[in-house]
Structures are given as structure tokens and as C-alpha cells.
Amino acid sequence: MRRPPLLLALACLLACKTSTSGRAKAPAATESGAFGTPIAGADASPLDPATTSSGAFANPGGPRPGRTDERERIGDARAPENAAPLGPPGSSKDRPLLACGTTGSYVAVADAECEDGTRPFDGDIPSGMKARRGNVGANKDGHVIDLYEVPCPEGPQKIFVDMYACDRAQPSRSEFERDTYVRDAFLVGDHARFSERCLAEQARGPDRVSLMLQSCLPAMPTALREQGKVAEAHGWLARYCGGTPPPTADQPKRWVYFRNVLEALDALREQQNRAASDRAYERKTVAAEYAKVCNVDLKAYERWLKDNPE
């Protein structure tokens, strides 16, 4: 039986299968987010419900190592005493900001802070993507380094990013927040808190895309349903299923979103230690209900799922 992507280790959250033209891509397992597939190139649609992720739901047992108040800002130099200043991560080709894959780079830049502590992009992934200015060649480690430019109050700030540093990259502010809400709200049953955060993120604008919103897209139907808000869950589903074209083998975006919605439910029930047989029965029942809302032919969906186990 196929193990759902969102129940794999965090190494699977966005399972990106595309890369920026002309650039080698990082391993797919490193480009994950929180319930599906992330932004991976300029032609990707960040608001597409199918480009959502599942990795944050894969590691509910404990906190991820990460930066909170100790994050280094763009202009925050920290050099050892009596040593020449190295500059903060991202300040030069040989002192790049460590990221994992194209999506990891966009998120890291979207979370970048200026010298005064402001965050120009405030976690908006498309803004981080558009800030890329090209690459500056390989550094001393042999990694091709990308150059981004962030509009800070003190003037444009250059950020050098190593997208191949998957073994050393630390979670960004957005990744830390997303994983915290999934682990400490959604998976423990505080669905009112999770829903409030998702609705607030959605309200920030139709063109804004963040890791938090990417997690909310497939998880909200379950979060709302757990609060007894079935009509609201159906409304959320109708909105985002309706944002995809009618599903076909060549255009499966709605099926991908539908699968991610059901896997969010599975992740919650597994965290609650529900028996596998009970989870399977509930999934079948809910799938039949949601298929009507999303106008999904379950037989066609099951055939696609069998042919596309990942």
C-alpha cells in the first residue's frame, strides 16, 4: 500500500519535481513544504491548490531544529573577536545563505530581514522568487550561488544563496511557523486556533502566497469539519477545487488537491492513534462526500491514484 507523502519524514513536504530552467535541481525529497508540491519555477502557479505541501504533517512528534529570536538578519554581522568580520549568511559568494532547492531559496529570501528588523517580503514566496537576479558562478564549495536583491530601507541589499546546502540549511521563520501550527494546533486538535490563523493568512490578499497558506489549503476542510462547521468546510473545498480545471490524466491538479485534503485527514487520525480500518472507512465516506463538492468522479480519481502512487 502506498504510504501517503505527508506521512513521510519532513524530507517529503513539497516533493518538487520541477526546476528552474538551466539549473540542476536539488533532490525531490528536499523540496517539500506542508501538504503537496511547492513553487519551483517562474511558470508555476503559487495559488494553485495542487501546489500545496504535506511535509509538516510528517513529523508531529517534536519540534524541528530552527531559528527563532536568534535568526541572523541581512546586515547583522557577527564575527569572532580578533578576527576579520565574515559578514552574516548571505552577505557574499563565499558566505551564502544556506537553503535547500529552489523553493527553499525563495522562502529564505521571502523571510529575509533588513538591518532595522523589517521583512520587505514578509514571507511572500512569489516576491522571493522575483527577487532573483541570476547566479554568480561557483563558490569555494563548488556550488553555483544565486544572487537575490531585497529592497531594504537602507537601500537594496544583495543576498547570495546556496540552494544546494540541504544538509546544513536551517528552517526559516515561515517554515518554523508553519510546522508549529501544524504540530501544535492542527495535529493536537486545536482546530479553532489553526482555522483562525489560516483565515487571517487568506485575508491578506489573493495574490499573496506563503508556506502557511499552502498548508491551510488542504488542511482547512478537516479543521472546519472537526469544529462542526461542515458547510464552511464544503465552501472552502468548493472554492479551491473550483480554482482547478476539470481533472484529466494530463491535467490532474484537482485530483492532487483532493488527495492532499484526504491525506490531511489521515494525518490527524493517525496522530490520534485511530485504527487503520477506521481511518480507511472514514476516508472512503468523506471522499464520497467531498467528491460531490469538488465534482470529482471517484472511479476516475482512483484509477489516477493507482497509476500515480506518489
Image (cartoon, rainbow, N blue to C red):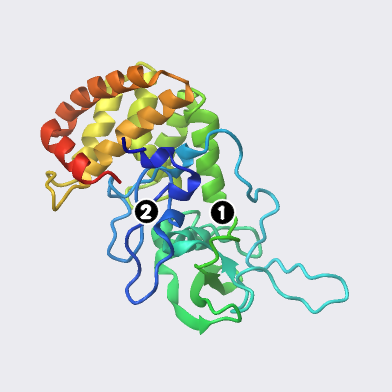
Type of amino acid under label 2: Pro
Q: Residue at x 43, y 59 (%)?
A: 103
Callout 2 crowding tier (Cα within 10 Å): few <14, some 14–19, many ≥20: many
Q: Is residue 75 left or right of residue 60?
A: right
3D distance between C-alphas at marks 1 and 2: 15 Å
Give percent across and percent down for residue 19.
35, 66
Between disc 1 and disc 2, whose residue precedes?
2
Where does label 2 land, which residue?
A: 38
Can the viewer see residue 243 in this picture?
no
**Residue farthest toward the right in the current orientation of the protein:** 82
**Residue farthest toward the bottom in the current orientation of the protein:** 137
Front-most of residues 231 and 82: 82
Indicate which disc residue 172 carries: 1
Q: Residue at x 34, y 17 (%)?
A: 278
Q: Is residue 70 left or right of residue 271?
A: right
In which quadrant of the rendered image does the N terminus lie? top left
Q: Residue at x 30, y 31 (%)?
A: 262
Type of amino acid under label 1: Ser
Q: Is residue 259 left or right of residue 14?
A: left
